[in-house]
Amino acid sequence: MSRGWFIVFAKAPRPGLVKTRLSPPLSLDQSADLYEQMLADVLEASSRFARKFGLEPILAFYPPDAVGELIHRVPPDFRLQAQRGLGLAERMANAFAEGAAAGARWVLLRGSDSPALGLAHVASAVDSLEAGYDLVLTPDKGGGYAMVGLRQPCAELFDVPMSTQDVLGQTLAIANHVGLRTTVSAPAFDLDTAADFSALDSLSSEESSDLCPRTVKAIAAFRFDGVL
């Protein structure tokens, strides 16, 4: 039996559905192509992390009809599960509820926009959940978070406007209000706009080749072609 669920929250790499804030300078097709490479990196790294820590890896995908597009992209150890709910917040809350209903001791959920989120981040989150923390958060540099873990579902945590600079602060305020024992790890970073690409340049060659080689290669190609 696994120690917990490790969910990758992702979308089908369709033009106009993903990474729209990258357009411009990228076209919608190019943005989707880049997201496809990011997702491949995230899934490969997450598969390794899940094996290392004895977790059950799950790809929670959106929209629900995207299973045919994604089933051949995932490592064989992943289970695919459609996201349920009208908005991102509801879909995230439901993912934690589904994990608890299935008997998971705890659930750790990461996004697919942070391909440089590494082993140390996951190790810190796993250690905190195993130590009894109710909530673990990995901030991103845009004011939200790249990864969130819960020992028990708490729908109230997601009752905040998503994709804003106040997500982390509001989430922590709710956690404090409902009495959750909470810890915050070292930050990661999402790739939401072209300005965020500079964060990848700060990675060592070992980090980029281990965590996000496809993402780095795709961005380098756009730079070489003068798109960026």
Image: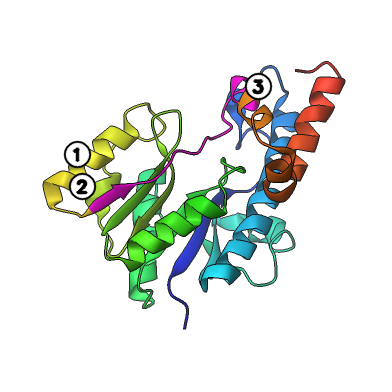
SS for dot 3:
loop
From the viewer's perspective, tell me whether residue 115 is left or right of residue 60: right
The reply to whether the C-beta atoms of the residues labelled 1 and 3 are less than 8 Å apart is: no
- Label 2 Cα neighbours within 10 Å, binned few <14 / some 14-19 / many ≥20: some
From the viewer's perspective, tell me whether residue 167 is left or right of residue 108: left
Quadrant location of the C terminus? top right
Tag shown at residue 175: 2
Examine the image and state in which quarter residue 225 appears. top right
Residue nearest the observer in this picture, 7 or 50: 50
The reply to whether the C-beta atoms of the residues labelled 2 and 3 are less than 8 Å apart is: no
Tag shown at residue 173: 1
Is 221 situated above or below 121? above
Pair 2/3: label in front: 2
The reply to whether the C-beta atoms of the residues labelled 2 and 1 are less than 8 Å apart is: yes
Q: Label 2 vs label 1: CA separation?
A: 5 Å
Q: Label 2 vs label 3: CA separation?
A: 35 Å
Is 33 situated above or below 40? above
SS for dot 2:
helix
- Label 3 Cα neighbours within 10 Å, binned few <14 / some 14-19 / many ≥20: some
SS for dot 1:
helix
Examine the image and state in which quarter residue 48 appears. bottom right
Name which residue type carries label 3: Ser
**Residue situated furthest bottom in the rendering:** 1
Q: Position of residue 178 (x, y in %)?
A: 13, 51
